[in-house]
Structures are given as structure tokens and as C-alpha cells.
Image (cartoon, rainbow, N blue to C red):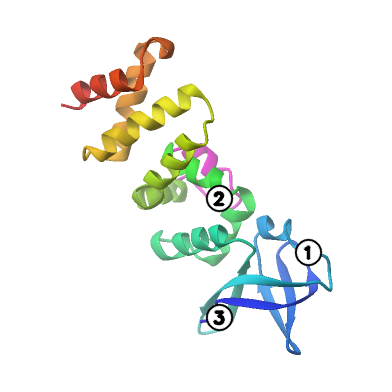
Amino acid sequence: MISFLDGELVEALPTQVVISVQGVGYLVQIPLSSFERLPALGARFKLLTHFVAREDAHLLFGFVTAAERDLFRLLIQHVTGVGPKLALAVLSGMSVGQFKTAVVNGDINVLSKVSGLGRKTAERIILELKDKVGVAAAWEMAASGRNDHQTKVNDAVLALLSLGFKQLEAQKAVREILSQAKTAEIDTEELVRRALKLLA
């Protein structure tokens, strides 16, 4: 397994780079998110990698951040029908944070806008990854202080998750209650209380 390359950036295109490491040029496929963070040509830098060995080719995929590589691995290892090419398309179409938010919110429409990603695959991604990225991403979203409404929703969903409810049913219950009540009039504690009654 090649974990990273530390060398000189020789060539940089939106979909691939060539890095010279001790006289050997490595061709590495990258997502657009990493391309935007590359240094100038000739600069020395470290690129995190994931190596894929196939019958017809040995391929290297590169990422500027660990979060990008983690998401890439999560997609190709845990989602049926998603290979390296589609995983790169996801990273090229949205940030890691946007992806996690879409999974947490079960937002099929956002995911299916990614080039090459159909609605069925988007549904499968949410189904197969919600328990792996959902809780952590929800905590991140809640901690980021996006707005009172979103924080309230995330806190309520997290509370229900900690009580053993599944993420999708918790989100559905919270949304249903909020659609019936004015958000300003209900705090997180009351939201959880009403959701428990609904789920009971």
C-alpha cells in the first residue's frame, strides 16, 4: 500500500497530477477539490494516496486532505456499486462537509446532482453510510452554530439517536413536529419530548 507521495509537482491537470519522487514520476488521479489546493508547479509537497490494484491496471488516487481520502475510502469500501471513478466524481462535485450534510439530512436531490450519480445510487449512499457518517456529521453541524433552527433540529435528532432510535425515523419525527408547530415556540427539550410521544 502506498500511503503518500512526497515530491515535486511536475504536472497538474484538474483530474490528475504527476509527482516526481526520487526520479520516478507517479501519475495520480485526483478530484477537483484537491486540484484547487495544489501548490505551484515545481513545488515540493505531500499528497495522500490510495492504491487500487486491478487485473488490467494499478491506479493511484491522490488527496490533499485526509478528510477527502477518508470519504473516498468510505464510498468505495462501503457502498455497493460505487467505484473509484464515481467516488472521485462525488469529491469533485461537493465538499466533504456538503456530502456529510446531505447524508445526515437524507438529501437525495443534492447527491443526485453529482455528475454520473443517479437517484438510485444516491439513495444507496444515504442508506449505507448514514450510520457511519451521520452521527459525527450531525455533531459537527450542531457545533458549527449554523443557525438556531438547524442547531435545534440537530440536537433533537442526536438526543433521539442516543436513546436508540434510527436516524431516519428520528429526523422524520422531528420534521413532522416542526411542521405542526412554530419553531420559535418550541425548544430542543420540548422537541425531543414530542418526538418521543410520536415514536412511541
In the displayed image of the protein, which residue is found farthest to the left?
200
Which circle, 1 or 3, is nearer the viewer?
1
**Residue beneath disc 2:** 96
Distance of label 1 from label 2 (alpha carbons): 21 Å
Residue 153 seen in the current view: yes
Residue at 51%, 37% in the rendered image? 109
Which circle, 1 or 2, is nearer the viewer?
1
Question: Which of the pair 39/60 is nearer the observer?
Answer: 39
Q: Earlier in the sequence, mark 2 or mark 3?
A: 3
State if disc 2 and disc 1 touch (CB < 8 Å): no
Q: Amino acid at mark 3?
A: Ile
Mark 3: few/some/many CA within 10 Å (<14, 14-19, 20+): few
Image coordinates for residue 51, horizontal then vertical, percent: 54, 77
Q: Earlier in the sequence, mark 1 or mark 3?
A: 3
Residue at 67%, 60% in the rendered image? 34
Residue 39 image label? 1
Question: Looking at the picture, does residue 197 appear above or below residue 79?
Answer: above
Q: Is residue 139 left or right of residue 176?
A: right
Question: Looking at the picture, does residue 32 appear above or below residue 58?
Answer: above
Distance of label 2 from label 3 (alpha carbons): 23 Å
Distance of label 1 from label 3 (alpha carbons): 21 Å
Q: How many marks?
A: 3
Mark 1: few/some/many CA within 10 Å (<14, 14-19, 20+): few
**Residue beneath disc 3:** 2
Q: For residue 48: magenta?
A: no
Query: Residue 57's quadrant in the figure?
Result: bottom right
State if disc 3 and disc 2 touch (CB < 8 Å): no
Span shown in magenta: 106-119
Q: Secondary structure at mark 3?
A: loop
Image coordinates for residue 105, horizontal then vertical, percent: 43, 36
